[in-house]
């Protein structure tokens, strides 16, 4: 199947630096969004290291057998998910080494979400609260679960999703790449169909916009302008953070 992707990022009205990084490679089927954190511009350094590491390990010249954590798995989908886990943990280690070498970067880290499409399957992995959505036949489905304290409260039944949107500091992470050391990303593989639309985004989009609003924009905006339309809607909705969106549409060959 053929992929058509567009990306858009915006500094937002408050921040001095854009600490989001992203990567789009239609031919290779690789799409990445990272949302960095840390003072002294360290967030943008962490997110760039994460994106560059994933790109290098999944598309570089290294032997694929050397780029997975568990070498005993044989199923091709399992192998790809192990490679995603390996890449994310390598990114975490590189960020920590950079922080140790430069004390001003101490405490830096990043979220990281990755979509890798091969043949008729999509492989996803994520750490943190950047998200991946699938819109199929007009119905939106969130494919990732935020690694946040608030999400833990939702899972425990102490908060509803509606209440969680009003909680201060709702973006406190329970996992991040770099800052939290070794990570255990959530991974999944699912079949794809022509017409599927994937949306990867930083929390600058999902803080001001809920899932139904994202679905509405996906249904109404022109595919070529969708990433930009989502970012602009988040800005109109009061978004203050950096905002990054990648849209990936699955087309017939």
Image (spheres, rainbow, N blue to C red):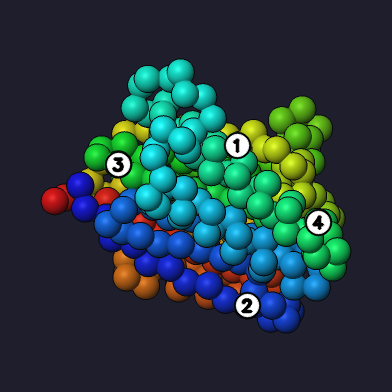
Question: Is residue 93 shown to the viewer in this render?
Answer: yes
* Front-lying residue, 221 or 133: 133
Q: Is residue 155 above or below residue 31?
A: above
- Label 2 Cα crowd, 10 Å radius (few <14 / some 14-19 / many 20+): some
Residue 191 at x, y percent in the picture: 31, 34
Q: Earlier in the sequence, mark 1 or mark 2?
A: 2
Mark pair 4, 2: CA separation: 28 Å
Marks 3 and 4 in Cβ contact (< 8 Å): no
Identify the residue under disc 4.
100
Q: Is residue 105 left or right of residue 143?
A: right
Mark pair 1, 3: CA separation: 20 Å
Q: Is residue 73 above or below residue 144?
A: above
Mark pair 1, 2: CA separation: 27 Å
Q: Earlier in the sequence, mark 4 or mark 1?
A: 4
The label number, if any, that marks residue 211 in the structure image? none
- Please tell me whether mark 4 sits on a helix, a strand or a loop: helix
**Viewer-side label of 4, 1:** 4
Residue at image position (54%, 38%) is: 86
Identify the residue under disc 1.
185
Residue 96 at x, y percent in the picture: 74, 52
Residue at image position (63%, 77%) is: 11
Identify the residue under disc 3.
118
* Front-lying residue, 220 or 188: 188
The label number, if any, that marks residue 11 in the structure image? 2
Q: Earlier in the sequence, mark 1 or mark 3?
A: 3
């Amino acid at each position: 199947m053929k992929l058509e992707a567009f990306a858009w990022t915006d500094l937002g009205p408050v921040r001095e630096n854009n600490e989001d990084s992203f990567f789009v490679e239609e031919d290779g089927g690789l799409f990445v969004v990272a949302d960095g954190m840390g003072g002294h511009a360290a967030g943008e350094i962490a997110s760039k290291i994460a994106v560059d590491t994933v790109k290098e390990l999944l598309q570089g010249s290294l032997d694929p057998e050397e780029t997975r954590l568990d070498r005993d798995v044989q199923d091709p989908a399992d192998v790809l998910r192990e490679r995603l886990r390996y890449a994310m943990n390598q990114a975490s280690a590189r960020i920590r080494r950079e922080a140790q070498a430069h004390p001003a970067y101490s405490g830096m880290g990043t979220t990281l979400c990755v979509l890798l499409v091969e043949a008729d399957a999509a492989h996803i992995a994520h750490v943190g609260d950047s998200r991946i959505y699938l819109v199929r036949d007009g119905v939106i489905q969130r494919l990732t679960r935020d690694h946040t304290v608030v999400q833990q409260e939702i899972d425990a039944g102490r908060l509803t999703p509606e209440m969680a949107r009003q909680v201060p500091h709702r973006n406190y992470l329970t996992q991040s790449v770099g800052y939290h050391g070794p990570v255990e990303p959530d991974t999944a593989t699912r079949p794809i169909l022509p017409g599927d639309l994937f949306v990867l985004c930083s929390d600058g989009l999902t803080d001001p916009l809920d899932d139904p609003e994202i679905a509405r924009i996906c249904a109404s905006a022109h595919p070529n302008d969708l990433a930009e339309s989502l970012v602009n809607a988040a800005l109109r909705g009061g978004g203050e953070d950096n905002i990054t969106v990648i849209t990936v549409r699955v087309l017939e060959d």
